[in-house]
Image (spheres, rainbow, N blue to C red):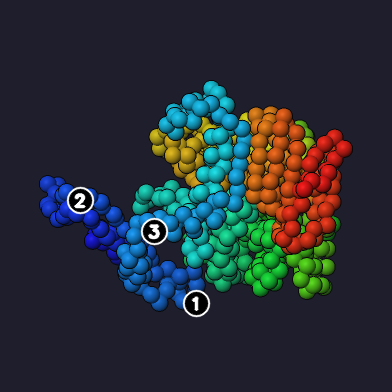
Amino acid sequence: MVQLNGKLSNGMEYQATALLQLEGGSAKVQADPQGGSLLKISEANVMTILLSAATNFSMDRKQNWKTTESAAAKVQRLLKSAAAKSYVELLSRHLKDYQQLYGRVKLDLGQSNENTIKMPTAKRLLEYRKSPDPQLEALIFQYGRYLLISSSRRGGLPANLQGLWNESNDPPWGSDYHTNINIQMNYWPAEPANLSECHFPYLDHINSIREVRKINTRKEYPGVRGWTLRTESNPFGGESYLWNTPGSAWYAQALWEHYAFTKDKTYLKDFAYPILKEITEFWDDHLKRRPDGTLVSPMGWSPEHGPTEDGVTHDQQIVDDLFINYTEAAAILGIDADYRKHIIDLKAHLLQPKIGKWGQLQEWETDRDDPKDTHRHVSHLFGLHPGRSISTIKTPELAKAAKVSLLARGDESTGWSMAWKINFWARLQDGDHAHTIIHNFISLVGGGGVDYNEGGGIYANLFCAHPPFQIDGNFGYTAGVAEMLVQSHADEIQLLPALPKAWSTGKVQGLKARGDFEVSDMSWSNGQLISISIKSGSGGSCLLRYGNLKHTVITEKGKTYHFKLDTKGFRKAG
């Protein structure tokens, strides 16, 4: 048995224990010439190493963030349980746990060259620069799902900047929770990629830090209700670096999205709504009213870019999104009618996005955007994605301006920024441009270092390269591919809204849409949708759109509806 243990300055305990099991042979500890110790295994037929690692962290401030069970006791309990099972039993248990999540979604984007598939990963990534490999593109989509399943399970912490794959005691940005896009991006695929359960570590974390954030917020902003965040955060709700006032409103989006995809009214009433209201109250108190009645976010900052000033587009769009989500939640629950009307009125007075002198969506209220600026953050396009206030259908002029801004920012950047751009181009329904970004993203990056503006891609193990490694790019890629195939943010389910020519024939099963609908089976050939099956989780009306074709289905809970597509539209099948 090999053991590592200790205690941090805040009293947080940690322990890791490795237990060696042998079939035949022997094991003994001997001196290492360099002054340490070696474990020597001789003549063993089978060697199994069981590893158990734990802390005494609890996601509960009332318990001082610590469990009553010590880290050592937890490790030994888990190790004892594992040691009582055979390797076959442990493997079977793991596969059952993992596959019930992973197996929900299947994706076929076309066939790759047989010889390419057999290549080692690094060589295959280099080959991708020269020839198509749709199976690699699908693999990286599923890899993002694997990473979320593996790093975000209820009872644990949310995935941080490195997920949980950190090899250093001094990792980039401390493996923290960055609140100005990074932790949010980690969870973009949770609902559409049918991993709703994996969303809860993030949602539970938001709930756990509320009281800490209220205390700290009132110190900075006396007299306000609710709470907000700084840019860098930790598991206890503590933080450093600059205030990121729209951060809590962006957190609120995740709370709403889980309801939108699941229609779980109990969750909305008991868990999400109280937090949504607190954050809404902060913005009710914090917004600045100008003499003409216009409401602006005071002294905001387009993340990591430009000046600090009133009415920054990023802030305005996120607050707008918050107010939409809050008022819809209150209406669904039939509560707080007067306050809901008040927030609807506030929303109507928010400063709206502006189109600038070269046709761009302005990043600031002042028209100062530089068409040569290729900054990695594209924060003023929040309303396009992950927000829902800009769309090609409902707000075509704003969508056109967003496209101008996006073209100016360029197609190459850091890994996570390119992943975000896949989602932008998907929302603009330009599948070929989204695929161009995918092609840029799947670029082999070697070595270490930090590059804030370009040089992004992926490493040989498929981790996203900022560089350095940041897992949000992997999750953003997975979300982006899902957005290219199915979108549901505009009160309808759009099928193949951004299908590139490179994926002319394919099939997907299991993607989720808002309204608690599942695209249980969708096939296309020669760039045309040929069949679609929709499963209704909660019942209700479902509006399907494919191009200019629309079809409304009144669904029953638990039933699946099958359609074929031709030039005349949707036809019932099966």
> Which quadrant is the N terminus positioned in?
bottom left
Q: Nearer the viewer, residue 229 or 90?
A: 90
x and y, in percent, of residue 45 in the image: 22, 50
Label 3 belongs to which residue? Answer: 90
Instruction: Spot the residue most to the top.
Output: 130
Tag on residue 100? none
Relative to 229, residue 130 above or below: above
User: How crowded is the residue under tag 2: few (<14 C-alpha within 10 Å), some, or many (20+)?
Assistant: few
Q: Is residue 450 left or right of residue 184?
A: left
Instruction: Spot the residue most to the right.
Output: 568
Q: Disc 3 to disc 1, how far (Cα)?
A: 35 Å
Q: Quadrant of the rendered structure where residue 359 is? A: top right
The first of marks 2 and 1 along the sequence is 2
User: How crowded is the residue under tag 1: few (<14 C-alpha within 10 Å), some, or many (20+)?
Assistant: few
Tag on residue 44? 2
Q: Is residue 531 left or right of residue 437?
A: right
The first of marks 3 and 1 along the sequence is 1
Question: Tag 3: residue type?
Answer: Leu
x and y, in percent, of residue 282 in the image: 68, 66
Label 1 belongs to which residue? Answer: 62
Question: Tag 2: residue type?
Answer: Ala
At a point 44% along the width and 39% down the height, the residue shown is: 461
Q: Disc 2 to disc 1, how far (Cα)?
A: 49 Å
Q: Nearer the viewer, residue 409 or 137?
A: 137
Q: Nearer the viewer, residue 543 or 379?
A: 543
Question: Tag 1: residue type?
Answer: Lys
